[in-house]
Amino acid sequence: MRDREICDLLSIAEGVRAATANCSFERGVNSDSAVATLLGRSLVAEVGRRETAGRPALLGVTPECLQYLGVRSLTDLPPLPATEPA
């Protein structure tokens, strides 16, 4: 798995339900390809739509993702390190 896919996966896991637009915004780049790869590998799935303009998809991690990461639940993941504002 590439770094950008891991970054998006962790963002989705941290947010539990992250909008596809958030993945791009957090990294400052287009994440469509990385998100498509995660969807294709069944590591994330669409869990709804945000009630905002454009109705972006809300993504959540799947049981396959938890197995891939070697955890039973999202609470088993270590916290992400704090990032300093740019």
Image (cartoon, helix red, strand yellow):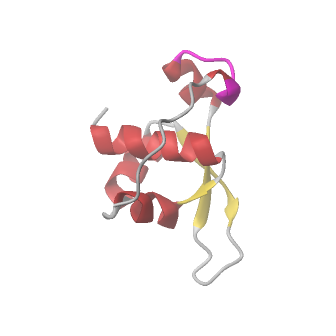
Give percent across and percent down for residue 67.
57, 19
Residue range (magenta): 70-75
The verdict on residue 35 being magenta is no
In the picture, measured across the screen, residue 38 lies left or right of residue 46, that is: left
**In the rendered image, the vertical position of residue 11 relative to residue 81, given as above or below:** below
**In the rendered image, the vertical position of residue 20 relative to residue 72, given as above or below:** below
**In the rendered image, the vertical position of residue 24 relative to residue 80, given as above or below:** below
> Which residue lies at the image location 55% right of the left edge and 46% below the top edge?
12
Which quarter of the image is occupied by the N terminus?
top left
In the picture, measured across the screen, residue 8 lies left or right of residue 1, that is: right
Which quarter of the image is occupied by the C terminus?
bottom left
> Which residue lies at the image location 45% right of the left edge and 57% below the top edge?
23
Question: Which residue is at the front of the view, 11 or 58?
Answer: 11
Magenta segment, principal secondary structure? Answer: loop
Q: How many marks?
A: 0
The verdict on residue 73 being magenta is yes
> Which residue lies at the image location 49% right of the left edge and 67% below the top edge?
21
Residue 60 visible? The answer is: no
Q: Quadrant of residue 19?
A: bottom right
Question: Which residue is at the front of the view, 82 or 9?
Answer: 82
Residue 15 visible? The answer is: yes
**Residue at far bottom of view:** 53
Q: Quadrant of residue 70?
A: top right
Give percent across and percent down for residue 25.
42, 65
Give percent across and percent down for residue 68.
50, 21
Give percent across and percent down for residue 13.
58, 40
**In the rendered image, the vertical position of residue 66 relative to residue 24, given as above or below:** above
> Which residue lies at the image location 32% right of the left edge and 45% below the top edge?
4
